[in-house]
Image (cartoon, helix red, strand yellow):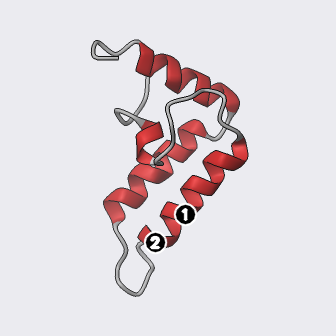
Amino acid sequence: MSSYPNPFGALGLPERPDLTDEQVRAAWRQIAAVTHPDRADGGDLARYTAASAAYAELRTPWGRSEAYADLADRPDG
């Protein structure tokens, strides 16, 4: 079961299990670059944490397939 309602959405990715490792990594790095808490402006800890958790879940093909299946099992999905 997913830790967040939609890990694909947390990274701004389409809800597809066939995303590549590179696509997932690039999305996470883009968000991390502007939301990291060590930035001079303080970043955005909540968004950084959500994106990091989503990346941890989606970084492998198996994780993406499982997360996609979880989304398909939602009552509203």
Question: The residue tagged with tag 1: helix, strand or loop?
Answer: helix
Task: Please state the total of marks drawn on the protein image.
Answer: 2
Q: Residues within 10 Å of mark 2 (few under 14, many from 20)?
A: some
Q: Residue at x 45, y 52 (%)?
A: 51
Left or right of 19 on screen, residue 49 = left
Quadrant assignment, res 42:
bottom left
Q: Quadrant of the C terminus?
A: top left
C-alpha gap between disc 1 and disc 2: 7 Å
Secondary element at image label 2: helix
User: Can you say which quadrant of the picture contains the N terminus?
Assistant: top left
Which residue is denoted by mark 1 in the rendering? 30
Q: Residue at 70% of width from left, 39% of height from top?
A: 20
Res 19 → quadrant: top right
Mark number displayed over residue 34: 2
For badge 1, the amino acid type reads Gln
Q: Residue furthest front?
A: 14
Answer above or below: position of 52 versus 5.
below
Amino acid type, residue under disc 2 in the picture: Val
Q: Residue furthest left?
A: 76
Q: Are marks 1 and 2 in contact (CB under 8 Å)?
A: yes
Q: Is residue 29 above or below residue 61?
A: below
Q: Residue at image x 34%, y 68%?
A: 44
| Residue 29, percent from left and from top | 58, 61
Q: Position of residue 16 (x, y in %)?
A: 56, 28
Eyeballing the image, is 2 above or below 47?
Answer: above
- Where residue 43 appears, x then y in whole percent? 37, 74
Tag of residue 76: none
Q: Nearer the viewer, residue 39 or 24?
A: 24
57 or 8, which lies in front? 8
Crowding around mark 1 (Cα neighbors within 10 Å: few <14, some 14 to 19, many 20+) is few
| Percent coordinates x, y for residue 64 in the rendering | 59, 30
